[in-house]
Image (spheres, coloured by chain):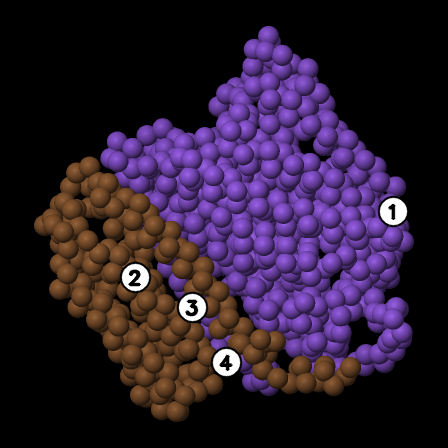
Amino acid sequence: MSEHATTHAAHDPNLGNTGLDHRKMGMWIFLGSDCMFFGSLIGTYLAYKGKSLSGPTPYDVFNIPLTSYSAALLLASSLTMVLALAGLQQHRIKAAAGWLLATAILGLHFVLNQVYEFASFALHEGLTLSTSLFGSSFFVLTGFHGAHVTGGVLWLLILVSLAWRGKLDARDYTKVEIAGLYWHFVDIVWIAIFTVIYLIP
Amino acid sequence: MATHAAFMPGAETERQNVLWSWLTTVDHKRIGILYGSSAFIFFLVGGIEALIMRVQLARPDNTVVGAQTFNELFTMHGTTMVFLAIMPMSAAFFNYMIPLMIGARDVAFPRLNALSYWIFILGALFLNASWLLGVAPDGGWFGYANLSSAQFSPTHSIDFWMLGLQILGISSMLAGFNFIVTILNMRAPGMTLMRMPVFIWMSLVTQFLLVLAFPAITVALILLMFDRFFGTLFYVPAAGGDPLLWQHLFWIFGHPEVYILILPAMGIVSEVLPTFARKPLFGAPVVIYSGIMIGFFGFGVWSHHMFSVGLGPVADSAFSISTMLIAVPTGVKILNWISTLWGGTIRFRTPLYFSLGFIAMFTMGGLSGVMHAAPPVDLQQTDTYFVVAHFHYVLFGGSIFGLFSGAYYWWPKITGRLLDERLGNLHFWLMLIGFNVTFFPQHFLGLIGMPRRIYTYAPDLGWNFWNLVSTIGAFIIALAFLVFILNVIKTARAGQVTGPDPWDGRTLEWSIPSPPPVYNFARVPTVHDRDDFWLEKYGDGHGAAPRARPAPVTAAEIAAIHMPATSYWPIVLALGMLLMLSGLMVSTYQIIAGGLLTLFCMYRFAMEHHRPPAGHGP
């Protein structure tokens, strides 16, 4: 019996029976839960699609080229996230910090585009939260996605600042990997939202 | 601060303030005790609300409370019992028992566990603060749109309900992430998934339901919040909005929630019966599969709460069939529980009485459930007292009997003292009789047409007699819980002190002292079977001898155990979240202040152990 006690105390406290890190498994389960969250919001949008009684329709307001550019930014940020992780794994901390910063900037650019989009809808197209069902469901769905991206940007910037202060190295691979899982998820959700809201007539 | 000193178990207690040590605790056992005692207090609050309602309904044209107060009472009774009593009582057992039964020293994320508790208790207090401000929620526990809109509910009553549930939901989901990881990742060596005790399995299914079902109500509540505060139109029919959207989102959460309430009790019963029948659970793998099936089908039956809205024959048929299907795994479980008793060496002790009560009462609740799985029958019964009777048979006759079975079963493990057997028996019989006297007549009342949620009724409707009977029953239930409280006090003063294994138990928690030391297991055990501790004591009955008792644990082994340090960030973070969400009713500045505090606390929480202090940890 006693050999288990000693081996148990010696090995990585975050590693469990499944061979997955606790924190990583926790993040996967959170993402599963978040799928239901966005699923419910997207379901609401679809349930109300074409049911607005007044106000502009989606095709009066959408600026597909701008939003496609935003989508491209977010897709590119998944690549930089992967490069950051690779850099960390190869002990190239400065490169990793640079790629993390690039990811954060791409994310921030996406959020700023969204702010611009929301503002132009509200100021020039007369579409607000309380204009119509379309306004309500569009702003709440894309707004919660934007909030997810904003949270991710903050998270990335904290990692960058840790790296600059010498507090992030290859030991922290899992922490950065988890931030990456979250980031890729938010990216994938955007692909779903972009397709469902903007592309499908 | 003593944050780092607590790396040594036992070193913390003496110098520290007792209150501070509880506020900053990350010990799953202490958090379990906090959950259990908070839940019992809210159970009493919900019970008192029920008693006032029963007094009002005892005779026709009664004037004890008015219509508005009655609305507040049934709304808060339902909300309290579901979210503040049964769920946290189950959470108490998850917290206390899961690590003990899987051979772990704590949960996967001890600080997150503390955070779940503090968010829960602050949300619960917030919800009940509405009583003190005179704006208790009054929209029913499922708060149907568009009664909940700013137009029809202009006061803060719905705000308290909506924000309170949102806060409680965050707590439940965080706990769900934590326990899934704990169960999947922290099992003792040798404990494969199929060797996990059935209570652990049912807990695991419950956690999956929590993390997958709560997002739906989160979204429903967010949409309501935007409607009430920011002028969106989700539930506004005048703008084309459909109040049915609320019903769908609510019940996509609400039906899995029913299984969130009952599966932990099923798990408890599956532990109690084998212990007191002294034989293994009959067909344990099938009980496990049935639990998984129930969880899976639980997501496909939500519209049976909505037959009366007219979804059309196709939807009605589909949801009717899926609802009837769910009766199959449930029936399988009932068969297995009864078969466990068959041929067993049964010892009638209080935990077993409560488990038997569970099986009988839950079966009756299940049968009336199958009745209104058929839409034509449901149309007759919906929104009558028949439905009230049905879900009390499931949630009181089921969940509460199961949870009290667990309370009597694990009390000696948690406190080191056995609850008094005679008072326990008295509690059981009073509760069983009181329960049936209260709720069985409600079937009759419903079938002769008494609707739910009415605050009074005319004397010539034929409802007088059974209503009076029901009220008398409610006071018998109240008496039963007074006996329980008396039992707890008596046991705390002069209860029989017990050893590690008072019931001749089968699972790992009985192999360690009562109450368990802070580190639970001095040596992490190796597991060979579902009933591992039983086999260690008695062999497998097919020739394998009992295992030799391990050598006594040395002081050096105990000194080498590292336990997580206490932390005050969970409670501060929970306060920040409360400040932020309640700010919606006060001012934007409070939202911003609360939001900044929440972000700051999240940062400090995440960074607290970013690098372990020198000389500690890996």
Badge 2, how many Cα within 10 Å: few under 14, some, many 20+?
Answer: some
Circle 3 or circle 1, nearest the eye: 1
- Lower position in the chain sequence, tag 3 or tag 1: 1
Q: Which of B534 and B289 is in front in this view?
A: B289
- The disc labelled 1 sits on which kind of residue? Phe
- The disc labelled 3 sits on which kind of residue? Tyr
To which residue does mark 3 refer?
B603
Question: Which chain is painted in brown?
Answer: A
The picture quadrant where one finds residue A119 is bottom left
Residue B159, x across and y down, in percent: 41, 39
Q: How far apart are marks 2 and 1 (CA)?
A: 58 Å
- The disc labelled 2 sits on which kind of residue? Ala
To which residue does mark 4 refer?
B611
Circle number at residue B348: 1
- The disc labelled 4 sits on which kind of residue? Arg
One can see residue A201 in this view: yes
Task: Give the secondary structure at mark 4.
Answer: loop
Q: Distance between the residues labelled 4 and 3?
A: 14 Å
Badge 3, how many Cα within 10 Å: few under 14, some, many 20+?
Answer: some
Q: Nearer the viewer, residue B134 or B391?
A: B391
Question: Which chain is painted in purple?
Answer: B
Q: Are marks 4 and 2 on the same chain?
A: no
Circle number at residue B155: none
Residue at the image position 36 percent from the left and 86 percent from the top: A86
- Number of numbered discs overlaid on the protein picture: 4
Circle 4 or circle 2, nearest the eye: 2
